[in-house]
């Protein structure tokens, strides 16, 4: 292979002779839509099926050659608890192809890809499909625990007297439903509260956050208008039109954004609806293979993958520095969260006192950072975002002639994920 001239700046490559290289062959996603819009009457497995079918259509990859399917999801639909299996069967995969579902908050599809990389690198599989799906238009709402206990007891009660006795203990408080928690079980704190506290701790102003969010929307609109979001596959909603683009990209003005009230910590918080990611429906899927198998089948891989769980670790393992990275794609849950993390990455004090490192990692330069928009503008279907990030990096590297990309995302519970992506020589 001959690398483009721009790649000659670095002779180092993640590809190692004698070691099974893991590659991204292709990645797709359904359009990401604001919850409660065109997808509202569907279910999660419908979107996941659409992403899987879109991946097969785009690659013409034989279904029987897929060894394994791993999908991520966060808010589970109880009827399809293993959504990977349901979506795979719906997309026409054989019932002999195993499929399992993982959950790791906003890095669920990152973990799905990490699992896929492990299966391929270990030699267990040659081709694995990973992905993620989130459907926030319809989430499971349960009866209260007291009501559930009563209903289960009623089901077991053998006499009319026992049933009447149980019904007599019914109180209005039993009828209050339980919504799925977007807060952490261990802290009872919502991510928005954490983002607000994080922004305050690192001195990230409301103005900083609004400017960052506006940048995301402006860049996403530009990328959309220029036809750069080529990972999207059309999705036909029964009884409605074909959906072909994201619908949450809405550049505003700083004046309009400044009028919004704090969404979480009132009245003095700085996190608002305008500088937060919104509830989103969507699904994504990627085809991950061993390099030799992909080449033998006639495919041109987009990128090498090297996953780990934090930026310093992934750079150290690869012997790279931040300066070697050509394209950065970080998940934008909240503008305050991103900016606080970038500030922390630039702090020697934070590195020494909180990370046990001698010196700071350094923050990505903004001219390389999320140049086609991010979760604030494109949307954030929790479990589907990771695959979008990796595919977008691969596409950016090809367009910009770069060699290395870095993906990073945060998740509830104080977890994080980083993945190094290297453009495959064409």
Image (cartoon, rainbow, N blue to C red):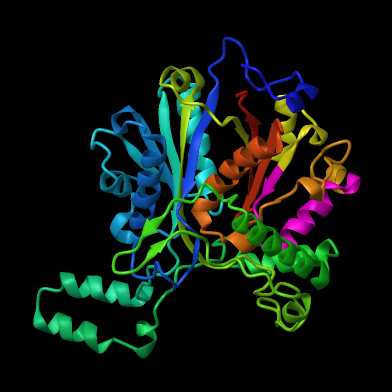
Quadrant into which the N terminus falls: top right
7 or 387: nearer the eye?
7
Q: Position of residue 254 (x, y in %)?
A: 77, 75
Determine whether 366 is above or below 225 in the image. above
Residue 396, how many percent across, how many down?
A: 65, 41
Res 30 visible: yes
Count numbered badges in the picture. 0
Q: Quadrant of residue 266?
A: bottom right
Residue placed most toward the observer, 84 or 33? 33
| Residue 144 place in picture, x, y as percent | 38, 76
Residue occupying the far top of the picture:
18
Magenta-colored stretch includes residue 70: no
Whether 165 is drawn above or below 189: the answer is: below
Residue 338 coordinates in the image, percent (x, y)? 73, 57
Q: Which residues are magenta?
A: 328-349
Q: Is residue 355 above or below residue 414?
A: above
State left or right for residue 377 relative to residue 365. Answer: left
> Is residue 73 visible to the viewer in this orientation of the structure?
no
As for residue 335 lying within the magenta part, the answer is: yes
Q: Residue at x 17, y 71 (%)?
A: 155
- 371 w.r.t. 8: above or below: below
Q: Residue at x 66, y 39 (%)?
A: 399
Extreme-left residue of the structure: 159
Q: Residue at x 36, y 72 (%)?
A: 142
Looking at the image, the residue that sits furthest to the front is 226
Q: Residue at x 73, y 69 (%)?
A: 196
In the picture, which quadrant includes the C terminus? Answer: top right
Closest to the observer, 187 or 167: 187
Which of the 4 quarters of the picture holds residue 402? top right
């Amino acid at each position: 292979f001959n690398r483009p001239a721009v790649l000659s700046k670095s002779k180092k490559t993640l590809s190692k002779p004698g070691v099974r290289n893991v590659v991204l062959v292709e990645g797709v996603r359904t359009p990401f839509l604001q919850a409660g819009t065109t997808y509202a009457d569907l279910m999660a497995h419908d979107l996941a099926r659409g992403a899987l079918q879109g991946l097969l259509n785009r690659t013409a990859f034989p279904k029987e050659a897929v060894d394994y399917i791993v999908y991520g999801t966060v808010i589970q639909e109880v009827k399809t608890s293993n959504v990977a299996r349901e979506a795979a069967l719906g997309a026409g995969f054989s019932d002999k192809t195993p499929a399992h579902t993982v959950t790791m908050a906003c890095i669920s599809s990152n973990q799905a890809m990490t699992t896929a990389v492990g299966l391929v690198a270990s030699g267990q599989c040659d081709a694995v499909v990973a992905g993620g799906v989130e459907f926030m238009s319809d989430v499971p709402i349960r009866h209260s625990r007291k009501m559930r206990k009563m209903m289960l007891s009623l089901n077991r009660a053998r006499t009319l007297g026992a049933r009447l006795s149980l019904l007599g203990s019914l109180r209005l408080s039993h009828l209050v439903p339980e919504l799925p928690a977007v807060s952490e079980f261990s802290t009872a704190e919502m991510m928005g509260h954490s983002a607000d506290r994080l922004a305050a701790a690192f001195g990230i102003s409301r103005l900083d956050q609004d400017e960052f969010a506006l940048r995301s929307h402006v860049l996403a609109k530009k990328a959309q208008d220029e036809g750069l979001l080529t990972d999207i596959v059309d999705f036909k909603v029964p009884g409605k039109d074909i959906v072909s683009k994201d619908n949450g990209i809405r550049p505003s003005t700083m004046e309009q954004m400044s009028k919004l009230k704090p969404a979480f910590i009132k009245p003095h918080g700085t996190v608002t609806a305008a500088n937060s990611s919104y509830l989103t429906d969507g699904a994504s899927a990627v085809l991950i293979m061993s390099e030799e198998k992909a080449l033998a089948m006639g495919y041109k891989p987009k990128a090498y993958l090297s996953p780990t769980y934090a930026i310093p670790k992934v750079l150290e393992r690869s012997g790279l520095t931040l300066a070697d990275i050509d394209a950065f794609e970080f998940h934008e849950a909240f503008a305050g969260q991103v900016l606080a993390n970038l500030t922390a990455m630039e702090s020697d004090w934070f590195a020494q006192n909180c990370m046990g490192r001698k010196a700071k990692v350094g923050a990505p330069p903004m001219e390389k950072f999320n140049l086609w928009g991010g979760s604030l503008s494109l949307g954030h279907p929790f479990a589907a975002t990771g695959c979008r990030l990796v595919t977008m990096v691969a596409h950016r590297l090809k367009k910009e002639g770069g060699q290395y990309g870095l993906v990073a995302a945060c998740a509830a519970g104080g977890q994080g994920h980083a993945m190094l992506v290297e453009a495959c020589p064409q």
